Image: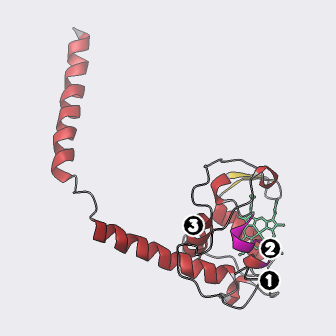
């Protein structure tokens, strides 16, 4: 008796959401839409590449850029975050860790973790780790070096600041 009372509304809610879902579900993206979306992302990857090599002066007060110590985004390991950081004594995100390098090793001003500059840094670092398995918590010493295949799949102009490995 109780079962009937509780199950019926659940079943009808499930059926209703199926119907509503099919009314509001849009068509899959077209090839042109996917191309436009990827183009927008690769533009951000390009911006991130430039920032990685010193294009944003607020990120460094000592002439160092990410590319000096992380050529081709090596050892930045976006696929291993969130993870424990001993100097901050807590689990941190990739943007927090990148801001740590900006403020400590580059003596620069931290980026807004939700802003376009940080988004671009992420777009570049993630692009360079494309295909890596997601392994949250893995320490840098446990990760495999990234293999870079040139033409990287995105347009880029070396900034001339920092160390370009191209
Ligand atoms: C002077 C050298 C230097 C510069 C410049 C530098 N880093 Fe780092 N970075 C390090 C060192 C050293 C570590 C610590 C590596 C470790 O703990 O194994 C590190 C760690 C990281 C990590 C964490 C990697 C992991 O797997 O834990 C990220 C993310 C990172 N850096 C991003 C950046 C970004 C983004 C920039 C530029 C804004 C930058 N770093 C600039 C030296 C540098």
Q: Residue at x 75, y 59 (%)?
A: 145
Q: Name the mark on residue 64.
A: 1
The front one of 152 and 2 is 152
Examine the rendering and report whether any part of residue 158 can be seen.
yes
- Between discs 2 and 1, the one toward the N terminus: 1
The front one of 18 and 149 is 149
Residue at the far top: name it.
1
| C-alpha span from label 2 to label 1 | 9 Å
State the image coordinates of residue 157 (x, y, percent, origin top left). Answer: 60, 88
State the image coordinates of residue 42 (x, y, percent, origin top left). Answer: 49, 75
Q: Nearer the viewer, mark 2 or mark 1?
A: 2
Quarter of the image where one finds residue 69: bottom right
Badge 3 is on which residue? 127
| C-alpha span from label 2 to label 3 | 18 Å
Judging from the image, what secondary structure is the residue with disc 2 in?
helix
Q: Which residues are magenta?
A: 68-74
Ligand 1 located in image quadrant = bottom right
Quarter of the image where one finds residue 102: bottom right
């Amino acid at each position: 008796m109780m079962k009937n009372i509780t199950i019926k509304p659940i079943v009808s809610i499930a059926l209703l959401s199926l119907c509503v879902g099919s009314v509001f579900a849009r068509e899959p993206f077209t090839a042109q839409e996917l191309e436009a979306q990827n183009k927008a992302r690769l533009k951000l990857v390009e911006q991130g590449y430039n920032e990685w090599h010193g294009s944003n002066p607020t990120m460094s007060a000592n002439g160092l850029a990410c590319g000096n110590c992380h050529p081709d985004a090596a050892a930045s390991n976006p696929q291993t975050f969130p993870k424990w950081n001993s100097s901050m004594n807590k689990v941190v995100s990739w943007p927090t860790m990148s801001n740590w390098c900006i403020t400590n090793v580059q003596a620069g001003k931290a980026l807004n973790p939700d802003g376009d500059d940080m988004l671009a840094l992420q777009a570049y670092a993630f692009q360079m780790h494309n295909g890596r398995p997601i392994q949250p918590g893995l320490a840098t010493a446990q990760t495999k070096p990234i293999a870079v295949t040139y033409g990287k799949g995105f347009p880029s102009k070396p900034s001339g600041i920092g160390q370009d490995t191209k």
